[in-house]
Image (cartoon, rainbow, N blue to C red):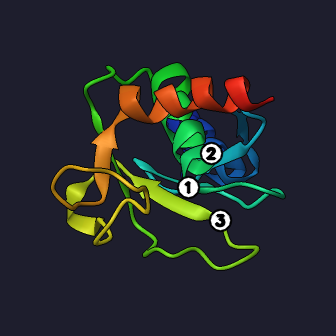
Amino acid sequence: MKLPSMAAVISSLLLATAPSFAFTAQNGLAVRPETAGTFNVPWQGKAGPSAFWCAAGDYGIRALHLTPDTRIYRTSEPPRRSGEGVRFTLDPAGAASSTGLAVFWPKGAGITAGFAQSFCEEDFKRR
């Protein structure tokens, strides 16, 4: 009987535990990785679109070590229903039709990680 390699065992353990890992963004929202390059920001009380983007950008920069000019895309179509989270990806192929933000540039579902993280600063100003 052939035993699995140590790398295979570690890899399967990491995949099995990945959904339970949560990154806490600057604004207190949790970010849960799903698959490679895809993550979810679950609803946690009063949070508008900018709060979800703050969490996505903060996760991208501080946890994934993305450069600030890397684009993050929303995959769940806006508007978000009450009690629902927002899903994000690094792959433009799965992008929703809109970011859900009130912005004044061409429509699309992606913004840079740096711009998304900048919404965290706005959140702190409101406190």
Q: Is residue 26 something one can see in this rendering?
A: no
- SS at mark 2 in the image: helix
Residue kind at label 2, given as amino acid type: Ala
**88 relative to 95 in the view: left or right:** right
Tell us which disc is closer to us: 3 or 1.
Answer: 1
For the view shown, which residue lies furthest in the bottom direction? 81
Instruction: Please state which of residues 1 and 102 is positioned toward the viewer in this rendering.
Output: 102
- The residue that mark 1 highlights is 49
Comes first in the chain, label 3 or label 1:
1
Tell us which disc is closer to us: 3 or 2.
Answer: 2
> Image height check: is 11 above or below 76?
above
Q: Residues within 10 Å of mark 1 (few under 14, many from 20)?
A: some
Q: Residues within 10 Å of mark 3 (few under 14, many from 20)?
A: some
**39 relative to 116 in the view: left or right:** right
Instruction: Please state which of residues 23 and 98 is positioned toward the viewer in this rendering.
Output: 98
**Which residue is rendered at x = 28% and y = 72% of the image?**
97
- SS at mark 3 in the image: loop
**Which residue is rendered at x = 23% and y = 60% of the image?**
108
Asked if marks 3 and 1 touch (Cβ < 8 Å), the reply is no
Q: Quadrant of the C terminus?
A: top right
Asked if marks 1 and 2 touch (Cβ < 8 Å), the reply is yes
- The residue that mark 3 highlights is 85
Whole-number angstrom distance, CA of label 1 to CA of label 2: 5 Å
Residue kind at label 1, given as amino acid type: Pro
**Residue 45's spot in the image, x, y percent?**
84, 58
- The residue that mark 2 highlights is 51
**Corner quadrant of residue 109:** bottom left
> Image height check: is 127 above or below 45?
above
Whole-number angstrom distance, CA of label 3 to CA of label 1: 10 Å
Residue kind at label 3, given as amino acid type: Gly
